[in-house]
Image (cartoon, rainbow, N blue to C red):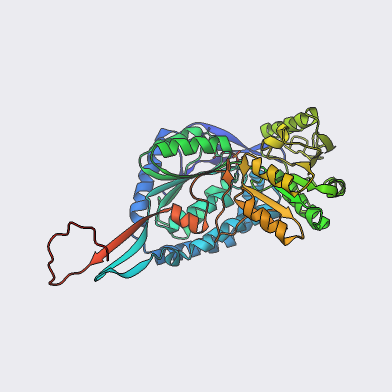
Amino acid sequence: MKKIENYIHGKNISHSKKFLPVFDPSSGEQIGEVVLSNEEDFNSLIKSSVKGYETWREFTPLKRSRIISKFKELIEKNIEDLAKLVSSEHGKTFEDAKGSVIRGLEVVEFATGIPHLLKGEFSQNVGNNIDSWSVRQPLGITAGITPFNFPAMVPMWMFPISIACGNSFILKPSEKDPSCPMKLAELFSEAGLPDGVLNVANGDKEIVDHILNSNKVSSISFVGSTPVAKYIYKTASSNEKRVQALGGAKNHLVVMPDANIDQAVDGIIGAAYGSAGERCMAISVAVAVGDIADKLVSNISDRAQILKVAPWTDNEAEMGPLISLDHKKKVENYIDQGVSEGAKLILDGRNCNIQGYENGYFVGPTLFDNVNANMTIYKEEIFGPVLSVVRANNYEEALNLVNNHQFGNGASIYTSDGEVSRHFTTNCKIGMVGINVPIPVPMAFHSFGGWKQSLFGDHSMHGTEGIHFFTKLKTVTSRWPKSIQSGPEFVIPTN
Ligand code: NAD
């Protein structure tokens, strides 16, 4: 049985004797165990991260960039193995896992440009013979706490940028699928990263609380559910840390009557059921505007019922299992609740049995019609393959639904009307918006983040926002006087 410890100062090591099982979600079998780190683990971790930072801050940005480039090559070389680690512990299809590693790799590529990205601003003669410039300097020890659904991509939203900026980084990955993050840390060491610059601490709330309460840690990056994001934000900011805490989502896709219905259905099927709906940018609500609704529901239903639900080892799988037995039960409870609150169940994913994988955590594609804004399945994040169709009479009603929802991660509109799409992008209260694009995930050189209950803090992930989050701004005003001695000045200089 695989034993997953911590990765501290270039070694697999742990003090705690407490371990938690890790499962293969397709079979429901235990395939490993992961350590639940304690205070002793935390003390080793901090000692190593302090050393790592002291060494790393002396590396020039160009030297850092070369090591990051080597890390990029190693990810490319090991991509199949990394994707297998993701699929075997998360359950998502192999191609989807590979895609998620590539999205993380793109942030590594972005981070190789760090000498350029750290360039500050310079003004000559802000006053007579006075120059002024700004620099961005590292924070020190930074930390990231990440969710189960993207064990490669989400950590890579954070640590390549933090490290490129000259910080050391402590990663606390999800305890449900920790193997891929461990492998990424090993590859970074192989690329030449000094020990202690990237440490991985496994575990649960206990180790997270040590990180949040340590005065040695300067910043916290978090991605996960909204209640935990709020806890992280409040605790870490009251401990005077910089925080970016990304939470849950309920992403709407509005289909206008003039939309290309085939494109909309393609978009909805992939975005609602891909990765079994366990994506923070998954579409969980389709808003059918006007008379397009009947056709839209019937076309989605036709396509969704023939989706191939299978384990990741099946090359034809389009959708895998959920992450855990508890989560499967939770999603099935939501379906029960949708039925009892009066939504029309068109496709029922409960009792999804896959031959040979009867103990796997599978829920089939589920479709509800006639969902309204008062129903629990509309208000809450389900995080499974459950799509709710809400019927709206017109565009204004659709926009109100999007804007009145507690979450504001992503939203899309399908239409052939430029004016409507422009109105939507201008007026929706959402962080990431798609026009005829179902999952508008920003590329690494832009920034990822939602509004409302989907993000707490001021900075999104990666792109320029990431560089700003992981650095402190310093502005220098400089004069080199030779012989002029004018005496003290008691008035603010104005030129
Ligand atoms: P989660 O909130 O349960 O866990 C996230 C991380 O926090 C894990 O590392 C976990 O060990 C830790 N954690 C859990 N409970 C904690 C507690 N009480 N105190 C301290 N730490 C705790 O989330 P999850 O189930 O792993 O992931 C799914 C959630 O993540 C969904 O809500 C999804 O929308 C969200 N998500 C959001 C984004 C985004 O960009 N907004 C991206 C991916 C996932």
In which quadrant of the rendered image does the C terminus lie?
A: bottom left
Residue 451 is left or right of residue 484, and the answer is: right
Residue 113 is left or right of residue 105, and the answer is: left
In which quadrant of the rendered image does the N terminus lie?
A: top right
Q: Is residue 262 above or below residue 387?
A: below
- Residue under the image location 42 percent in, 39 percent down: 237
Q: Would you identify the image quadrant in which residue 479 lies?
A: bottom left
Q: Observer-nearest residue: 146 or 343?
A: 343
Report whether residue 36 is seen: no
Relative image position of residue 351 (x, y in whole percent): 81, 33
- Residue under the image location 67 percent in, 55 percent down: 423
Q: Observer-nearest residue: 151 or 395?
A: 395
Instruction: Write down which quadrant ligand 1 falls in.
Output: top right
Report whether residue 209 is seen: yes
Q: Is residue 102 above or below residue 287?
A: below
Q: Observer-nearest residue: 249 or 411?
A: 411
Residue 222 is left or right of residue 54, and the answer is: right
Q: Observer-nearest residue: 85 or 389?
A: 389
- Residue under the image location 55 percent in, 40 percent down: 3
Relative image position of residue 168 (x, y in whole percent): 41, 51
Q: Is residue 194 above or below residue 207?
A: below
Relative image position of residue 181 (x, y in whole percent): 54, 48
Relative image position of residue 194 (x, y in whole percent): 40, 56
Q: Would you identify the image quadrant in which residue 478 lies?
A: bottom left
